[in-house]
Image: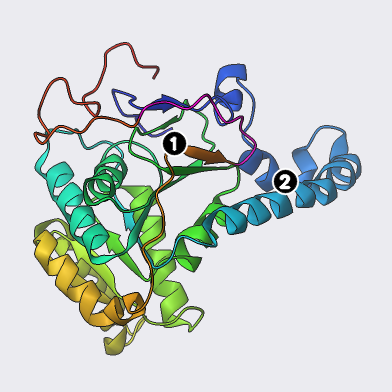
Amino acid sequence: MAELPNEQRGRENPTLNRAARMGTATEDERLLESPAVQPGGPAAGFTSTDPWRVFRIMGEFVEGFDALASIGPAVTIFGSARVAPDHEQYATARETARLLGGAGFSIITGGGPGIMEAANRGARDAGALSIGCNIELPFEQHINDYVDVAINFRYFFVRKTMFVKYAEAFVIFPGGFGTLDELTEALTLIQTGKVRNFPVVLYGSGYWKGFLDWIRGTLLNEGKISPKDLELMELADTPEDVHRIIMAHSGDVLEGVERAPVPQYPQRHGLVRNSAPKSPVEEEPAVTDPDSPAAPHKGDAQ
């Protein structure tokens, strides 16, 4: 298993932590398990489990569609969960989301720490709707303190549908396998005409240089992609660059559209109990302020 972040920050998410706390398989793991190794044998395991699991999957789609139907134009921001609040990438992701939120976009992330927290925080700075789509994993999950609308998912493919369906653009900050997964899936959907060609912005030319060199030197050189496929991605090195690129491609969708309202108290969707209302986080201008709500706490669950 991949190394986990050293610190967990944000509000507890007991619904998605059930498998981690009980030491059981996640719903995704159960779904992808071969019928041959399921309890009860191939026939019993498959016929008594998978057909009925379709209803839970259907329920997640309905919950996600219902929660996100009225968020207005949005931008999905991806990136590493392991970036600390005092890192430069955190500050730039926060400022990027602030600029996009100020332009009228809602901001969608995975709802966790790192770049996700920074982007949700930037949306909060701008008074824009801040959305977090969390996912059940084999370890404890927390929703960061800057999410206005949180949605819990047990199946990756349902969550990915929400990221794509409700976005006008993707911003890809430095990240690991999960970030690369979202990036390459978006490029595939655009390349194959499954979604309209909207901007996919890679933030940090230095970070993505090796990846792009490999694409040009190997994939393109061996004819695995066409030269035009390289145009599916654009590079940016400042939050202003990201704002300019997205507004040039997708800014017209904001015309005549009212900004999505921000709920007074955080909302949670997806097989969770809504907790008692809590006061919104009081924002501090300095990211490195030790009293900032985004600062890691040693007592947080791993």
In percent of width and height, residue 192 lies at 48, 82
The residues bearing labels 1 and 2 have C-alpha atoms spaced at a distance of 42 Å
- Which region shows up in magenta? 270-279
Residue 211 seen by the camera: no
Q: Is residue 92 above or below residue 15?
A: below
The quadrant holding residue 38 is top right
| Circle 2: residue type | Ser
Circle 1: element type: loop
In percent of width and height, residue 189 lies at 46, 74
| Circle 1: residue type | Tyr
**Residue that carries the numbered disc 1 in the rendered image:** 265
Q: Callout 1: 10 Å neighbours few (<14), some, many (20+)?
A: some
Question: Viewed as shown, does residue 97 lie left or right of 134?
Answer: left
Please tell me which residue lies in front, 267 or 28: 267
Residue 124 seen by the camera: yes
Q: Residue furthest top?
A: 299
Question: Viewed as shown, does residue 76 lie left or right of 273?
Answer: left
The quadrant in which the C terminus is found is top left
Please tell me which residue lies in front, 81 or 252: 252
**Residue that carries the numbered disc 2 in the rendered image:** 34
The quadrant holding residue 107 is bottom left
In percent of width and height, residue 289 lies at 10, 26
Q: Is residue 162 magenta?
A: no
